[in-house]
Image: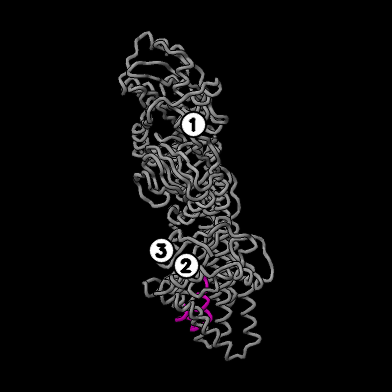
Amino acid sequence: MKYQIANELPGRLRVKLAGPVPPADLDALYRVLGSCPDIAKSTVYPRIGSVALTYNAAPGGRARVLEHLAAIDAAAIAKAKQGCGLELAPRSHSLLMDLASLVGFHFMRRWFLPAPLAAAWTVFSYRKFLFAGLKSLAAGRLDVPVLDAAAIGISFAKRDPRTAGLTMLLLNVGETLEEYTRSRSEGALINALLDLPETAQLVEGDTEVQVPSSSLRAGQLIAVRTGMPVCVDGTVVRGCAMVNQAALTGEPLAVERTVGDDVFAGTAVEDGEIIVEVKANEGQTKLRTIVNLVEQTESYKSRTQSRMERLADRIVPWNFLLAGIVALTTRSLVKTSAALMVDYSCALKLTGSIAVLSAMSQSAQAGFTVKGSQHFESMAQADVIVFDKTGTLTEAAPQVARVLSLDGWDDDEVLRFAACLEEHFPHPVARAVVRAAAEKGLEHRERHAEVEYIVAHGIASSLAGKRVVIGSEHFVVEDEQVEISEAQKDLIARETEGLSPLYLAVDGKLMGVIGVQDPLKAGVPEAIAELRRLGLSRAIMLTGDNERTAARIAARAGVSEFHANLLPEDKYAFVEKLKAEGAHVVMVGDGVNDAPALALADVGIAMGQGTAVAKEVADITLTGGQLGSIVALRRMSEGLMGRLNGSFKEVMAINSTLLAAGIGGVISPQMSSLLHNASTVALSMRNGKRYDA
């Protein structure tokens, strides 16, 4: 079998296969992987052709696992299929076959093996539970494996191997059901994330074409500039850029990538421009990032979920104390075993984990990607929401409403040259200028030198040795010291009233102004009003635009508080001030200039059509870019917190009742174990249902 090692830790390995695993081969692949004695656990992600393995880390274990993987071929899969007996629907784990094997082999041994041989097999089977318990004790832990080993050991102490065998069967069935429930939730999340669209700038000769990233093939060239994502693995063949690789490596700072360096899907360009030769298609690389997200969700648990799991671990020693008290007071091994057969840990951890995975999966389907349950909790607790203007409250496709030419240039020349500069960058205003030029049939040839994107300000380049700048009034007039007469100021104010002006200057002289109209997104006033009703008492707009335009948009959006003419550091400082006052802040933005504030806020939400850097630092991305999704997100976040708190109370009540019934002799230890596992799976299945959003 062809594979590549994608990620590796001692005892853990994730490999990338040559392609997706067909549904008909899934069960067979699990069986073949399970036939290697060094592989303790395997999880297959069929749509993305990825396999996560837990293996024996003893000397030689890794080598034997790799040798086993290399030996898997079509013949091995075909042979394993014959043993499966039936084809099941695609699923995250071969549940029915595993359950049938566990139950079938247990009763076959009981019915057909002589009693001494059956007892010997039961003792041999106990080794897994015993070693797991001893390993925990050696590490100084009193946890669930120790509980299980002790409960089974009591049956052996009573010279009752049949009960010990039945107990191990119930524990194995419970573990299988729990693993299936978790795998199914992870699979649903991955499938939802797979459908998120991405595009790339394909370089064809001297031109660029925007294409779906899924259509890219090895050997093609793509352009990646400031604020844009790297959507495939590739090699830099031209240019230099600072690339944010936090999603893959965890490095907080961008790293320089130049000619000959490799870049990877799931990263983003913070500054610069590179031409990348595609090494592998998007279907093979995007999914690695998705699997990383799923695997890393454990690192982003909410405080409520973490508190539940810490409590679950702390309860285990009390289980032993209870069992000791029962043993001393009743002198009954049966009742002592009952005190050990029920634990709170698995139920609390599994129900919480499934609730979170379900919320993440549903959120992806609903149009927002959340990086972990802690962000749901922060969203549920937030009381202030801060919006960027352009591309957030206003459409991501603003329109050029006025072109004003000065100093001898005509309107078409101003628009043509502005489009020539702006076509290199993904900002909504830049796209509006390029689109306006195309609609007028204004073709442009690149006569300028390499362009430089100055975050939150504009673009600078050179033409025939002269410096050319285009951007905000602050950038052109204050930073670049371009002089504007009083007559020109009056003309610009009159002609661009209510519009966002974009200034174009050559060699220190203002040549033209482009007035851009920002249509308000549909449903914005309703969404903001609903967010207020849901407890977000303050809604604030921050923008780098001028005061007049900001006031007009704020009034139409229903935002009573706004601040204009802000730089990225100003937005950051404003969010910092809100947090210092004790507010729980949600920041919503889409540009490179919003990234610092997005990273600082309690919850950073990036619009899906925004820059890759904004989406990289944000905690949540709105795929569709509509504010109605934030309303749904708030409701889902509150629903998740309610579900976590509710399942905690139910787990405590159910398991306490089972403990009392077992210790009181109302039910047998085996029945309490069965009911404990059944209730855990039932609560997990319920927590896996859809949220009302």
Under circle 3, the secondary element is: strand
The C terminus - image quarter: top right
Q: Magenta: predominant secondary structure element?
A: helix
Q: Position of residue 154 (x, y in %)?
A: 49, 82
Q: Is residue 333 magenta?
A: yes
Contact flag, marks 3 and 2 (Cβ < 8 Å): no
Magenta-highlighted residues: 326-345
Q: Secondary structure at mark 2?
A: strand
Question: In the rendered image, which residue does mark 3 sit on?
Answer: 9
Measuring from the top left, give residue 494's x and y in whole percent.
45, 11
The crowding category of the residue bearing disc 1, from other C-alpha atoms within 10 Å (few below 14, some 14 to 19, many at least 20), is many
Name the disc covering residue 633, or none.
none
Is residue 325 in view? yes
Q: CA distance from mark 3 to mark 2?
A: 10 Å
Q: Residues within 10 Å of mark 3 (few under 14, many from 20)?
A: few
Which residue of the protein is positioned furthest toward the front in this rendering? 205
Mark 1 — residue? 391
Whether residue 271 appears in magenta in the rendering, the answer is no
Q: Is residue 300 above or below residue 102?
A: above
Three-letter amino acid code at the position of disc 1: Gly
Residue 6 appears left or right of 684: left
| Location of residue 327 with respect to 500 vertically, above or below | below
Q: Which residue is mark 2?
A: 54
Q: Is residue 586 visible?
A: no
Residue extending farthest top: 487
User: Which circle's residue, 1 or 2, is located before the other in the chain?
Assistant: 2
The quadrant of the image that shows the N terminus is bottom right
Q: CA distance from mark 1 to mark 3?
A: 41 Å
Question: In the image, what residue occupies the spot 41% across and 43% down?
Answer: 237
- Residues marked 1 and 2 touching at CB (< 8 Å): no
Q: Amino acid at mark 3?
A: Leu
